[in-house]
Image (tube, rainbow, N blue to C red):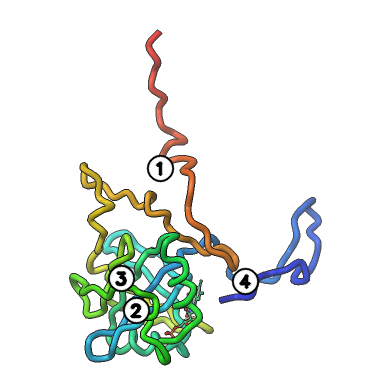
């Protein structure tokens, strides 16, 4: 993870009022604070916290995680070609942080964090039963980028917690307080301030 930026990183004042130039860096925030599960029955299971992750294509559904080659998880993901991105919630924040500072070389992270490794639908890596949604992925390409390699992957199944499905079978992820990572801190998402397309939605006429 990049170090937090401080005013010391300021290089030059901008001629435009109230703008400052910082050194280039990775600042697309907030990022998901995901627990990526990897490994299989032969290699053993592991968890790694990942913030460098996202969607890259809707159809076929594809996403990515970027992992440093020195991570224990890197080899597991490369060898098995599979992983699951487990979305996290405020209730999982300790496990998220712990799995992001300890290594599977030294610990059984599922056991240490009291998390349940549940068999996935389509891959050999487990999913985290306590996660509201696990995205089961199969690696398509490994792209070396520098500090991190990007695992570009196909989404082969979505593995959702049944309790978050409402009567109409729509998925209420917001009620699980999804966790995000923002410049060194974890936040739980809160109050909605809009919905897709609301800015152009026609207002309902109120009968007079
Ligand atoms: C909030 C947070 C986000 C992280 N994001 C990444 C990431 O995107 N890629 C990465 O390689 N490491 C990331 N890390 C560091 C790894 O999770 C950490 O080095 C972990 O101990 C590796 O586990 P492993 O040795 O069992 O693979 C992150 C850590 C934290 C706390």
Quadrant including the C terminus? top left
In this picture, is 77 found above or below 173? below
Residue to which mark 3 is pinned: 128
Label 1 sits on a secondary structure element that is loop
Q: Position of residue 13 (x, y in %)?
A: 81, 61
Question: Which mark's residue is nearer the viewer, 3 or 2?
Answer: 2
Q: CA distance from mark 1 to mark 3?
A: 29 Å
Q: CA distance from mark 4 to mark 1?
A: 30 Å
Q: CA distance from mark 4 to mark 2?
A: 33 Å
Residue to which mark 2 is pinned: 110
Question: Is 118 left, or right, of 106 in this rendering?
Answer: left
- Pick whichever of labels 4 and 1 is earlier in the sequence: 4
In this picture, is 134 found above or below 178? below
Residue drawn at 23 percent across, 56 percent down:
162
Label 2 sits on a secondary structure element that is helix
Label 3 sits on a secondary structure element that is strand
- Pick whichever of labels 2 and 1 is earlier in the sequence: 2
Residue to which mark 4 is pinned: 25
Question: Is 141 left, or right, of 200 in this rendering?
Answer: left
Label 4 sits on a secondary structure element that is loop
Callout 1 crowding tier (Cα within 10 Å): few <14, some 14–19, many ≥20 = few
In this picture, is 138 found above or below 59? below
Residue drawn at 42 percent across, 91 percent down:
106
Q: Which mark is residue 196?
A: 1
Q: Which mark is residue 188?
A: none
The reply to whether the C-beta atoms of the residues labelled 4 and 2 are less than 8 Å apart is no
Q: Nearer the viewer, residue 66 or 186?
A: 186
Q: CA distance from mark 3 to mark 4?
A: 31 Å
Q: Nearer the viewer, residue 20 or 189?
A: 189
- Pick whichever of labels 3 and 2 is earlier in the sequence: 2
């Amino acid at each position: 993870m990049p170090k937090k930026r401080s005013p010391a990183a300021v290089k030059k004042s901008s001629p435009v009022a109230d703008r400052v130039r910082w050194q280039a860096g990775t600042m697309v925030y907030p990022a998901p604070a995901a627990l990526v599960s990897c490994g299989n029955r032969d290699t053993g299971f592991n968890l790694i916290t990942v913030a460098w992750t996202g969607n890259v294509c809707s159809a076929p559904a594809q996403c990515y995680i970027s992992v440093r080659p020195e991570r224990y998880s890197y080899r597991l993901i490369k060898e098995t070609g599979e992983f699951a991105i487990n979305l996290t919630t405020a209730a999982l924040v300790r496990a998220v942080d712990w799995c992001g500072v300890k290594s599977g070389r030294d610990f059984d992270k599922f056991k240490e964090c009291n998390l349940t490794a549940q068999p996935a639908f389509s891959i050999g890596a487990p999913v985290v039963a306590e996660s509201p949604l696990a995205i089961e992925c199969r690696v398509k390409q490994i792209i070396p980028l520098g500090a991190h390699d990007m695992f570009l992957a196909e989404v082969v199944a979505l593995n959702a917690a049944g309790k978050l499905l409402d009567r109409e079978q729509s998925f209420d992820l917001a009620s699980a307080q999804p966790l995000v990572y923002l410049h060194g801190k974890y936040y739980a998402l809160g109050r909605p301030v809009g919905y897709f397309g609301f800015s152009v939605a026609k207002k309902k006429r109120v009968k007079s």
